[in-house]
Image (cartoon, rainbow, N blue to C red):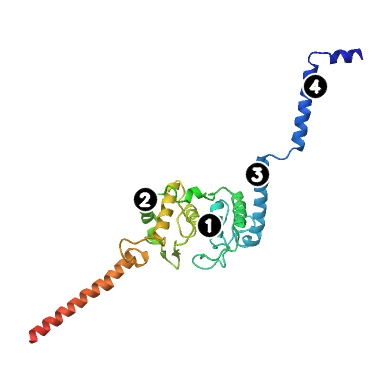
Amino acid sequence: MKKLSARRRHPLAAVVVLLLALAATGGLYALFAPASKAQADVAEQSLTIEEGKKLYSVGCASCHGTGGQGSSDGPSLVGVGAAAVDFQVGTGRMPAATSDGPQVPQKKNIYKQGQIDQLAAYIASLGAGPEKPTAAQYGPEGADIAKGGELFRTNCAQCHNFTGKGGALTKGKYAPDLEGVSPKHMYEAMLTGPQNMPSFPDTTMSEKNKKDIIAYLNAVNSDQTNNPGGLELGGLGPVTEGLFAWIFGLGALVAVAVWVAARTAKAKKS
């Protein structure tokens, strides 16, 4: 008892007791405290991926394989990224009604946005790929419409025509009409290159350039846009303009030539 009392009177006894109390308190807090925000985010992401996997098994696995590895009916989805899923499913192109045909058409979407996000999270977990863009990336703020028009005519008009009205390609394929397409889906299409379209990653076309192109398309397809050149002829560019010139211009010249010949013949008779 005397030895115990002596230890209690030791100058460091209070410090030792305080350290033990702090250690016990910290251990109990770590044991019973709620999970941190980072742990909660990881748990939520895991749940999102799991739900996306369930949706994938029902609507996608029959063509793309049980693990997204692809099959004879559908390509591999490993590494396509969340942006490709958001575009393909968000525009109704996927799930495809049939694997036949030159390309998959746009149709009514059968998934809600929350379900699309779950599918995108699952596919993104299979391999790194382009992420879904944010509103700041495709929004009109800070965009240069004139620069966007120049970029579009250089890189896109060959297929989509001058104002994005679309056009025919080879073997039954086509470039779709871009009027009414959401800015997000335009950005995702440029980022991922769906079907016949080439991809334009940030290393090829900067984020700012994509924003400019989207702003241009929104401007030329707006209901409030006035055409300073007069009749737009469908906005298809030199094809319709040349056709108009040949039919009406050449027709007018032929009519004038016939009229002159008739007047000359009449003058000779008289």
The numbered mark at residue 87 is 1
Q: CA distance from mark 1 to mark 3?
A: 25 Å
Q: Position of residue 135 (x, y in %)?
A: 51, 50
Q: What amino acid is labelled 3 in the image?
A: Asp
Rendered view: 167 above or below 46: below
Q: CA distance from mark 3 to mark 4?
A: 37 Å
At x 47%, y 62%, the residue is 180
At x 18%, y 79%, the residue is 258
Circles 2, 4 touching at the beta carbon (< 8 Å): no
- In the image, 251 versus 114, the foreground residue is 114
Quarter assignment of residue 119:
bottom right
Q: Position of residue 200 (x, y in %)?
A: 45, 51
Q: CA distance from mark 1 to mark 4?
A: 62 Å
Residue that extends furthest to the right in the rendered view of this protein: 1
Residue that extends furthest to the bottom in the rendered view of this protein: 269
- In the image, 262 versus 202, the foreground residue is 262
Q: What amino acid is labelled 1 in the image?
A: Phe
Q: What amino acid is labelled 4 in the image?
A: Val
Q: Is residue 68 visible?
A: no
The residue where tag 3 is placed is 41
The residue where tag 4 is placed is 17
